Image: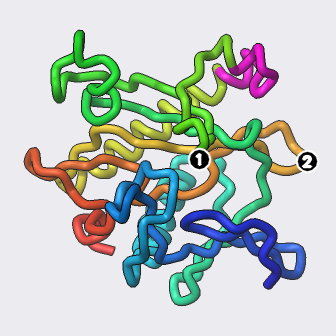
Amino acid sequence: MEIIYKGKTKNVLQENGKTYLKFKDDMTGTDGVFDTGGNEVAGSIEGAGHECLKVSKFFFEKIMDKGIKTHYVSADLDENLMEVEKAVPFGKGLEVITRFKAVGSFMRRYGLYAKEGQELPLYTEITLKDDEHDDPLITKEGLVALNILTAEEYDKIVELNKKISQIIKDILAEYGLELYDIKLEYGKLEGSDEIVLIDEVSGGNMRAYKDGKYVEPLEVSKYLGI
């Protein structure tokens, strides 16, 4: 397989006209401390890539069972490979964050007004994937002004993201987990204007709790029974 892009936690590969994501055991963080929202590789944990792919496979298939299109095609858990339809990100990539409760960076920014853990039903934020500038928040107007999205594309992404995030929250609830927030990515299928969910949907994308206690990203699969 030919590597066409090297990422921090995944590589993009191609073979015989097909596109694959290769999940690695590298984990992001800062100064050697693991943090799923980190902008650099902090080290590796054996089996991390397998866990991320396993959970991603689970959620992509559940989402597609609801009739929602994604870039997911299939997964090879033995090889840590996920076959995907080739998709084009918006700009150099956007992260769409859905918050159900006020925690983490939301509290760091808005702690003057927010209370820890207060309800924020389907509150949506969009950040630019930009390690150098710590993934800055950007508004709808900013995205349109910079020609990253049209106003119509923004509205479609937010609507689709709320639907998908609620599906994931409801699925986690079936397994006794509560979703506080989740980060997802979207793009257009190559040669199409269709906007779909891309990248991964793993424990590293979300902040989930069990009986008020934070569940580590690599532990999510245990609660899902996969």
* Residue depicted at x 85% and y 50%: 190
Q: Residues within 10 Å of mark 2 (few under 14, many from 20)?
A: few
* Residue depicted at x 62% and y 72%: 82
Image quarter where the C terminus lies is: bottom left
Q: Position of residue 164 (x, y in %)?
A: 49, 40
**Left or right placement of residue 164 versus residue 15 in this view:** left
**Left or right placement of residue 147 versus residue 156 in this view:** right
Q: Nearer the viewer, residue 110 or 170?
A: 110
User: What residue span does the magenta drawing correspond to?
Assistant: 143-154
Q: Nearer the viewer, residue 150 or 85?
A: 150
Q: Nearer the viewer, residue 35 or 76?
A: 35
Q: Position of residue 68 (x, y in %)?
A: 60, 45
Colour pattern of the rendering: rainbow
**Residue marked by disc 1:** 67
Image quarter where the N terminus lies is: bottom right
Magenta segment includes 151? yes
Magenta segment includes 97? no
